[in-house]
Amino acid sequence: MWWKEAVVYQIYPRSFADSNGDGIGDLQGIIEKLDYLNGNPDSLGVDAIWLSPIYPSPMVDFGYDISDYEDIDPVFGDLKTFKKLLKEAHKRNIKVIMDLVINHTSDQHPWFIESRSSKKNKKRDWYIWEDAIDGKPPNNWMGAFGGNAWEWDEKTKQYYYHGFTKEQPDLNWRNPEVKKAIFKMISYWLDMGVDGFRLDVVNYYIKDKKLRDNPKDYFKGLRPYDIQHHIYDRDRPKVHSILKSFRKLLNSYDGDRMSVGEVFIEPPGNPKLATSYYGDNSDELHMAFNFAFLYCKWDPNKFKAAIASLEQELKPGDWPNYTLSNHDQIRHIKRYEKGIETIPRMRIAAMLMLTLRGTPFLYYGEEIGMEDQSVPKDEIQDPLGKMYWPIFNGRDKSRLPMCWNASEYAGFSTSKPWLPMNKNYKKNNVEVEAAKPDSLLNTYKKLLSIRRSSEILQKGDIRLLDDPSGKVLAYFRIYKKNRLLILLNFKNEKVQFDLDKHTHPKTKTILLYSTDMQRLEGETIKLPHIRLSSYEGMIIKFE
Ligand code: GLC
Ligand code: CA
């Protein structure tokens, strides 16, 4: 099962590499960067890429509003280029995961245009249409991107439901024809050779049939949406039967096609994993995203608790996964920023991600320590930023163009990119970091290569250890009779970690890797008192 051993790298296609100089990243740009990702000795060494949506779209939500499921948006290229990308990626042992946005379409999708045309249209029921009640929407459901979730259609005198912007009407998944059409589309990509899917807002597909009001005043948050308890517009039981048949469809293909679902569960910031989306017997999604790390403060005990609770919640056979950053979140470099300690922290975070049990999902640019930067008001692109400015200026800041080198526009493009360049790009880019032995990029490369060659890291169990000092995160990874000890010093000070004598057999212990360049690989580590320098991460091998 490749997806268990794989490290996945998320690409936000608009911002990765622009091949034709229009300022927007594209598929040919990605093809030209595949060598950077895998397949040659200098590559980063990731096993799969997840592409945020590349289908034709009016780009109200930058591809998360799809107007044609079976084609490529001209801004990104065409089907021929996509097939070339698949082929070139596979040549380099990179799997390709597409974003599946099937909770809603664009309002420009022909299905919705038809549905909207009249109450009698045969696609009317493909979306969620309701009469007004006393001149008002049928219930209190809110759109996640602001305002009421119901949009009045003057022509046909009904409301349609949209969980996000009004340009993203929700499909009616209770209609069997919708399911049929979507599954046909999924087969189309599977036939082409796509290796898997990331399922956008998978827990939103099914809404309460009776359209009951959500309870209010449940949670305090930025958006009016946050105060509701989303028990009727999300996580309805029937979604699981859809996912069971979706899994059967994937399983009917050879080559182990995988799926990972985006599931935020209530209340917001809940570090619990949505294990129910793995199914009863691993018969639904292969994985539901584990977003627990997005809410962990820089504290080893917080991370330890998140790992422990995940390991505990997983049912037998369910496989863990970890994420620190993605296109909707503030990058973790920003969350853990602390002057000159920031990069040392990023090394610790990288070692954590790449030595845990479970599939790591990396986000483009994190390997070079690319920073978030706020976008000036008149350059905001994200609909969420436009809606909530100035309280929140949106998600553009974590979607800036990738910094490849120090040339104008950072080697991303030959003309002004669709979002501003990162201010630090001259110092902080792939070319500069590749040349520096102690760069963050080289730390990632090293860790990725260690993970790749270690069955213990890819397949082993995890045993979390206690650290009374509260400064170190420590765990064993164990596979068959072999073990690795991982020690991560979260502090900017020297610490001593004492290994409980009961937890280690009397064997030789050697250093496999340390983030501290002063140390020598292969050096013997004396137990049980291990001294770590500030922000040192160590992987120790028990022979
Ligand atoms: C998901 C995506 C986000 C998008 C939303 C609506 O949360 O990750 O980027 O805006 O769904 O499709
Ligand atoms: Ca382009």
Image (tube, grey):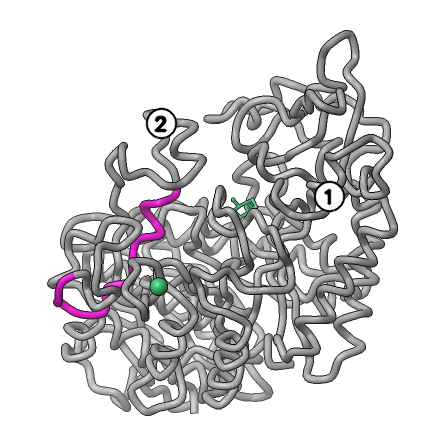
Horizontal arrangement in the rendering, residue 233 relative to residue 424 (left or right): right
Q: Is residue 260 magenta?
A: no
Q: Nearer the viewer, residue 517 or 383?
A: 383
Label placed on residue 171:
1
Is any atom of residue 357 visible in this view? no
Residue positioned 51% across, 83% down in the render: 456
Q: In terms of secondary structure, where does tag 1 sit? A: loop
Residue 455 in the figure: left or right of residue 273 = left
Q: Is residue 93 left or right of residue 275?
A: left
| Label 1 near ligand 1 (CB < 8 Å) | no
Measuring from the top left, give residue 57's x and y in whole percent. 53, 51
In the rendering, at what x and y percent does residue 276 appear? 74, 52
At label 1, the amino acid type is Leu
- Quarter of image, ligand 2: bottom left
Query: Above or below — where is 429 with respect to 88?
Result: above
Q: Which residues are magenta?
A: 395-408
Return the x and y of residue 161 as percentages of the image width and height. 70, 31
Q: Earlier in the sequence, mark 2 or mark 1?
A: 1
Say which quadrant the C terminus sits in: bottom left
Is residue 375 or residue 118 the one in the foreground? 118
Give left or right: position of 401 versus 516: right
For the point 48% across and 74% down, the residue is: 7
Q: Which residue is mark 2?
A: 389
User: Which residue is nearer to you in this view: 76 or 388?
Assistant: 76
